[in-house]
Amino acid sequence: MRKYAWMLGAAMAWLTGCNPAPKYSRPTFPAPPAYKEAPPDQYKEVSGWKIAEPSDDKIRRKWWEMYNDRELNQLEQQVQISNQTIAQAEANFRAARAVVAQARSALFPTVTAGPSFANERFGARGAVLPGTATGIAPGTAGATGSGTFDVYSLPIDVSYTADLWHKARNTVAANAFTAQASAADVATAMLSTQAELANDYFQVRQLDRQRALLGETIKDYRQTLELTQTLFRVGLNSQQDVAQAQTQLNTTVAQATDLGVARAQYEHAIAALIGRPPAEFSLPVAPFQANPPPVPVAVPSKLLERRPDIASAERRVAAANAQVGVAKAAYYPDLTLSASGGFESTSIANWFTWPSRFWSLGPSFAQTLLDFGARRGATEQAEAQYDAAVANYRQTVLNDFQAVEDNLAALRILEQELGQQREAIASARTYLDLALNRFKTGIDSYLNVITAQTALLTNQVAELQIQLRQMTASVNLVMGLGGGWDVGQLPQIREVSHSPKREAQLPVPPEADRVAPPNPPPVK
């Protein structure tokens, strides 16, 4: 008997080691050795970014602090607490983790109990009494006749389907990988929301500076208007010049007023990002600090470990791979071990006595013999979904490399453009001074002054727009590089394989509490 038991145990161990899922390996993507938009060696650092040293190639988790803006720091701290998009992503993560707990239940026996009471009647000639274990009413000894009986029953059923072909374990793995991807989605939502807040904040500050610029320009235009009126009164100027000066002043005042629309909208957007009603939030006017700090740029291969959206796409590839194993397991038979037992009697006094016991025990095999291609179709579908997940992963990596290259190029080119724009402003100032002097002496008409003033204002506004684009590119570069996130912040398989608690925090641990990168079970 021991020999047969040992052989059965060995056979079960061998069968449970058969995993039909392909062995998983992370999809390959050849990362370039360096970014195309990296500057030559003589330009190791430009405004907005720098080539990182090996000891300093990591962006801090609170990356916005590099901009040295207290108001921005306070706003960013409220994003994780109050932003509803992040709250939704975190709830989706908890739901995904709960699915893992549900899938794990298939690895253990199912125990059910069904106590019941029934008043039953059976017909003549020893008719079967459905509620009894023997099929004949207790006490009748197979006698004929009919009668009514009370039946008390307490059956307990135990059922266990052996996971011989890793169907349950691959399902658990697929759901665990999906939960990890959902955790990365939380980090992606966090990073994109933080970047959006920073960009909106800099938009507000640029509008404040532009409005101040228009205010200074309006002051100059008023002085010019007074000059034209004085010259008109002494007969050295025409009423047409006065009208032109008045028109230019009124137009600029309207432009300054119009900036209030955009500023209000950006202010409302910031309120929504920090989870507050726009009516309860206002942002005071403050200077525009247009000085993008240097962002450490590591080698391109590091990007694969520091972008949460790449990690999410890769975890979904692993989940799709595990689903292939689930689909292939349908080709093999299921072994179910079931047992039931309990007490049943027509008398409540004898319900839990030893003679009232009943039980049954035995295994069963189930195998689909003919399904007209259903299993083959399910397997092909799973394999196609795996291929789609791989393609999505590689496209995500490509898009992220593009985002980094775009912003590196933007910062490098905008730095040159800003210098050229400042030269244009200096030229416009000289042009305006000459035009005013010639107008005061009566050599030129006031039209030349208007042209010079318009050119100066246009170039000054263009300078502000370039500075805003620099700040936006800086923020987008931080986001493109992962914003201080890395794959070590993903929760481990064991952390997503247990029942979640309602009060669970966001899966973004502090730097001191980060876990090592996950080592997934070999399901493909």
Image (spheres, rainbow, N blue to C red):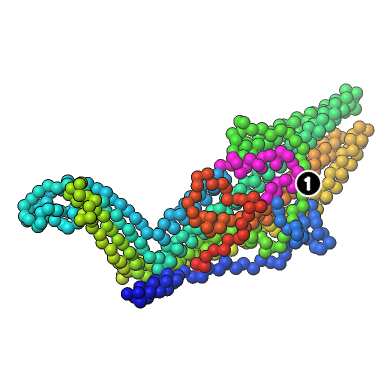
Q: Is residue 289 visible?
A: yes
- Compared with 131, 7 (above or below) is below
Looking at the image, residue 326 sits to the left or right of residue 223; the answer is left
Rendering coords of residue 490 (x, y %) = 58, 56
| Residues rendered magenta in the picture | 61-84
- The part of the image, by quadrant, that contains residue 368 is bottom left
Q: Is residue 241 visible?
A: no
Residue at 67% x, 40% y is 75
Residue position marked by numbered label 1 in the rendering? 291
Looking at the image, residue 473 sits to the left or right of residue 89; the answer is right
Query: For the residue carrying disc 1, how many other residues have a C-alpha within 10 Å: few (<14), some (14-19), or many (20+)?
Result: some
Question: Most extreme residue toward the front, as rendered?
Answer: 354
Looking at the image, residue 456 sits to the left or right of residue 380; the answer is right
In front: 465, or 457? 465
Rendering coords of residue 415 (x, y %) = 79, 52
Residue at 77% x, 42% y is 289
State the SS at label 1: loop
Residue at 92% x, 35% y is 437
In front: 458, or 102? 102
Looking at the image, residue 376 sits to the left or right of residue 202; the answer is left
Question: Most extreme residue toward the right, as rendered?
Answer: 441
Rendering coords of residue 158 (x, y %) = 32, 58
In magenta segment, residue 69: yes
- The part of the image, by quadrant, that contains residue 199 is top right
In front: 348, or 438? 348
Rendering coords of residue 299 (x, y %) = 71, 62
Residue at 6% x, 55% y is 144
